[in-house]
Image (cartoon, rainbow, N blue to C red):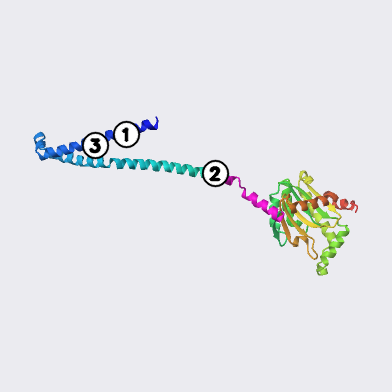
Amino acid sequence: MSDAVRGRGADVRRRVEQLALGLMATSGVVVLLADLFGWLDALAPGGALPKVTLLILSTVTVFLLLELDRLKRLDEVQDDVKALDTSVQTKIDTLNANVEAHLSKLDIDAIAGRLKRQHYGGVVAVHTRFPEDVFTGFLGNAADELVILQTWIPNLHRLKAAMHKALTDQQVHVRVLLLHPSSPVAGLRDEALRAVRDPALAVNVRASVESCLAGLAELNAQIPAASRARLQVRLYNSLPSIAVFKADEHFLVSSFLHGQLAIDSTQIEIDGADTVMGEEVQQELRTLWSIGNDVDLLDWRASVASISL
């Protein structure tokens, strides 16, 4: 039905309502006049109550007749308010949908990570010494690989349980790079560690490397045979540049300073193998792994003796 037809119907309805109210008001006035002239008593003897009733009705009807247009305007205002409310709610819903659509395009964590990589090369924290709890947390969540580059691993006994779990339960590939115990570099590292220490506290690098190899052989014997292929150890004969503990995309990197072990030195935490720092560290790992020689942990002594320097 068109708006014009609906409008005409509403006008007709209002005219009918006005006509009915007018007739009722007129009837009330006629009854009042009839009562004044005594005609009502002649027509309806003893009808006082109907008279009062008609008088009240006529008064109310007159009032409604006078207020009809105002009531009509109230209806129109109410309709306008409802229409406005619907329009506003529709606009709010549309605005919320647009805001959510734009926010969904913003990955806040990804943006923060990208900014860190751009400005800090992947460095996310610096630790005063090796944070074993942090690294074991990284290792506990690792799904790909664990790589350790050291002269030897002084804290191997505290990491063996996490390494065992990674090899057997998580099926993580573990690669360990250690200094060859007979390398000339071992003597140089001995001297560096004694440079500012009491000679009584000197560390024998060769003996420490061999002790570490014995610990790795023990770990290899404790894990199931099916997991042993994932544990690889190589010895390198080269000047070590950095010490690295890597679990998937997380790195802890330190330097070989004079007078202290690498794990007691400042540790740089790097997040992301594709960052500037991450790529440099991985290149160093690839270089030393390529020049290293495999160690058979089933008989590590014989295997080390067979490696020519």
Magenta segment boundaries in residue numbering: 102-121
Mark 1: which secondary structure?
A: helix
Are circles 3 and 2 on residues that touch, CB within 8 Å?
A: no
Residue marked by disc 3: 21
Q: Return the residue nearer the eye: 104 or 26.
A: 26
Residue marked by disc 2: 98
Foreground label between 3 and 1: 1
Residue 278 appears in view: yes
Gap in angstroms between the C-alphas marked 3 and 2: 53 Å
Q: Kindly give the residue lying farthest to the bottom in the view shown.
A: 198
Q: Position of residue 204 (x, y in %)?
A: 84, 62
Residue 152 appears in view: no
9 sits left or right of 214 in the view: left
Q: Amino acid at mark 3?
A: Leu
On screen, 307 above or below 192? above
First in sequence, mark 3 or 2: give its number: 3
Whether residue 259 appears in magenta in the rendering, the answer is: no
